[in-house]
């Protein structure tokens, strides 16, 4: 009986209409709306501020480039001193006139291994571990590395420790110990770097482009193989140091919180006695005649890497200023033609860029973007149309040139915002043989470029373009419509 009553009650609940909720129209305690705040008082702008900001004109930027104190020691070392007493630190940097272009053809990687070991292998009376401990105790940082055409050794130290650690820095330059155990560690790191360079598709694209543009035998495109590094010995490193480390052509940049008189005393004691003659002249070769071609490096990647390379400009060329502005109008972030059309208007890539750099021969113009495999050929066609049309069928406008000039002049100031940059920029341009007034005249020469000159200059970039595509092999048929396709399975063997 009871069970029947329960069933009837449940059935009634299931079929009975659900009452509408009571609508509360009266205030409930704790839920009253907050009183409305009175509007903020407003005041009319002063007459001098009530203007259209786009009509405002500012005074021209006045930038005076601070010149380092520069002098020679007599043995060939040029010294640059730039004081900065805002922090109690000193940075000592040696710029040496030897780099990876000095590697013998059968010992590629030697300069990089030598420079890496220089800061780690002990020096003078100190073994490798003793040198590490001394630097750590004084919170000092010693680094070294090799670029294509120069190498650097840097010591960052508290100003109070400069007198004690500067002789150690001189020992590293002149009397490195090249500890054998550390040599094995440095070489192992270099070998691992070679083994892993295929892991980065952007690095694969850059390596292939350098080989395609400069030629695989060029000192600017060669790269070490595992066999080169495995064959290196501590004796090779010692000979490289003996043959290529010389005071002649070395530039010593000292910046920060120091007393000039005390530094000059240290230089006289520890650097001036360094002896050595000039290095042999470098031979870069004349490069190779360029015709446009497409180089496909088959890789299964989520983002296809597209890189296009053309001639830049030789160092000290009078074309530098117009070519720099043409490049800015083409590939600068946010406003360049490549960025605007490929990225903003068509959505074919997250970003697109270009850059132009000088070199001992032609220099290099580089444009690039990354995109999905299904959009790669379309994006490349758009990029080629922009490059080939600039200056010709689609010349730059006065507004584009004006924007490029403003960006170049404004960015120039940031090259000299610290004492360290001031000193190193000057030393680097001296190393490459630029005239003394190069930096002082850079802005005036940039501002003097005409629209006609920029439109003529940009045509240089599309001459003999080398087009590198790192992406699926299935792109090959579509790429053949853009030029002869060279298929490369192994960049190391690319000839």
Image (tube, rainbow, N blue to C red):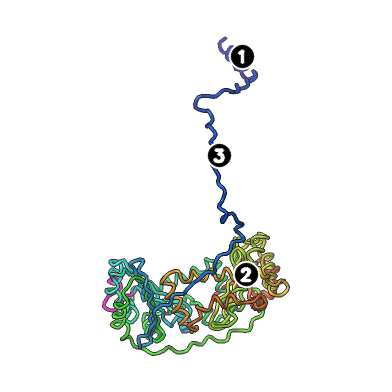
Q: Are marks 1 and 3 in contact (CB under 8 Å)?
A: no
Rendered view: 45 above or below 404:
above
Which image quarter: residue 79?
A: bottom left
- Image location of residue 75, percent across then percent down: 35, 88
Q: Residues within 10 Å of mark 1 (few under 14, many from 20)?
A: few
Q: Which residues are magenta?
A: 121-130
The furthest residue to the front: 47
Report if residue 81 is visible in the image: yes
First-in-chain label (1 vs 3): 1
Q: Are marks 2 and 3 in contact (CB under 8 Å)?
A: no
Report if residue 487 is visible in the image: no
Residue drawn at 60 percent across, 63 percent down: 334
First-in-chain label (2 vs 3): 3
Secondary structure found at label 2: helix
Q: How far apart are the alpha carbons under marks 2 and 1?
A: 88 Å
Secondary structure found at label 3: loop
Residue drawn at 64 percent across, 18 percent down: 16
| Quarter of the picture holding the C terminus | bottom right
- Image location of residue 375, percent across then percent down: 67, 62
| Quarter of the picture holding the N terminus | top right
Name the residue that disc number 3 marks.
39
- Label at residue 8: 1
Q: Which label lies toward us, 2 or 1?
A: 2
Q: How far apart are the alpha carbons under marks 1 and 3?
A: 62 Å
Name the residue that disc number 2 marks.
402
Q: How far apart are the alpha carbons under marks 2 and 3?
A: 44 Å
Q: Residues within 10 Å of mark 3 (few under 14, many from 20)?
A: few
- 368 within the magenta span: no
Secondary structure found at label 1: helix
Q: Are marks 2 and 1 in contact (CB under 8 Å)?
A: no
- In the image, 319 versus 45, the foreground residue is 45
């Amino acid at each position: 009986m009871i069970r029947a009553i329960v069933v009837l009650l449940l059935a009634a609940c299931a079929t009975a209409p659900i009452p509408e909720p009571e609508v509360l129209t009266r205030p409930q305690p704790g839920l009253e709306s907050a009183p409305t705040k009175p509007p903020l008082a407003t005041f009319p702008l002063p007459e001098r501020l009530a203007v259209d900001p786009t009509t405002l004109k500012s005074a021209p930027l006045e930038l005076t480039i601070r010149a380092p104190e520069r002098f020679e020691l007599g043995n060939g070392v040029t010294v640059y001193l730039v004081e900065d007493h805002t922090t109690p630190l000193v940075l000592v940097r040696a710029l040496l006139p030897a780099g990876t272009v000095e590697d013998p053809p059968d010992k590629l990687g030697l300069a990089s291994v030598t420079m890496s070991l220089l800061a780690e292998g002990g020096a003078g009376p100190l073994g490798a571990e003793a040198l590490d401990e001394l630097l750590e105790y004084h919170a000092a940082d010693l680094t070294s590395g090799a670029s294509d055409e120069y190498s650097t050794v840097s010591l960052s130290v508290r100003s109070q420790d400069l007198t004690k650690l500067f002789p150690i820095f001189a020992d590293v330059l002149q009397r490195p110990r090249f500890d054998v155990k550390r040599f094995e560690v440095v070489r192992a790191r270099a070998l691992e770097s070679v083994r892993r360079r295929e892991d980065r598709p952007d690095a694969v694209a850059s390596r292939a482009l350098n080989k395609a543009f400069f030629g695989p035998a060029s000192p600017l495109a060669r790269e070490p193989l595992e066999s080169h590094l495995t064959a290196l010995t501590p004796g090779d490193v010692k000979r490289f140091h003996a043959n290529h480390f010389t005071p002649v052509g070395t530039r010593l940049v000292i910046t920060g919180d120091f007393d000039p008189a005390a530094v000059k005393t240290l230089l006289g004691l520890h650097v001036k006695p360094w002896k050595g003659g000039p290095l042999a002249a470098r031979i870069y070769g004349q490069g190779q005649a360029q015709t446009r071609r497409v180089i496909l490096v088959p890789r299964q990647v989520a983002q296809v890497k597209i890189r296009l390379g053309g001639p830049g400009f030789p160092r000290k060329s009078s074309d530098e200023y117009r070519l720099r502005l043409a490049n800015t109008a083409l590939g600068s972030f946010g406003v360049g033609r490549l960025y605007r059309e490929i990225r903003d208007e068509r959505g074919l890539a997250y970003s697109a860029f270009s850059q132009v750099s000088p070199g001992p021969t032609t220099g290099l113009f580089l444009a690039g973007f990354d995109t999905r495999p299904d959009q790669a050929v379309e994006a490349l066609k758009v990029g080629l149309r922009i490059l080939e049309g600039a200056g010709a069928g689609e010349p730059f406008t006065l507004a584009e040139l004006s924007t490029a000039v403003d960006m170049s002049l404004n960015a120039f100031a940031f090259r000299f915002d610290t004492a360290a940059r001031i000193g190193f920029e000057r030393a680097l341009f001296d190393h490459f043989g630029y005239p003394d007034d190069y930096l002082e005249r850079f802005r005036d020469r940039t501002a003097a470029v005409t629209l006609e000159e920029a439109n003529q200059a940009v045509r240089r970039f599309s001459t003999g373009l080398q087009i590198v595509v790192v992406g699926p092999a299935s792109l090959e048929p579509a790429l053949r419509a853009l030029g002869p396709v060279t298929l490369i399975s192994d960049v190391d063997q690319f000839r």
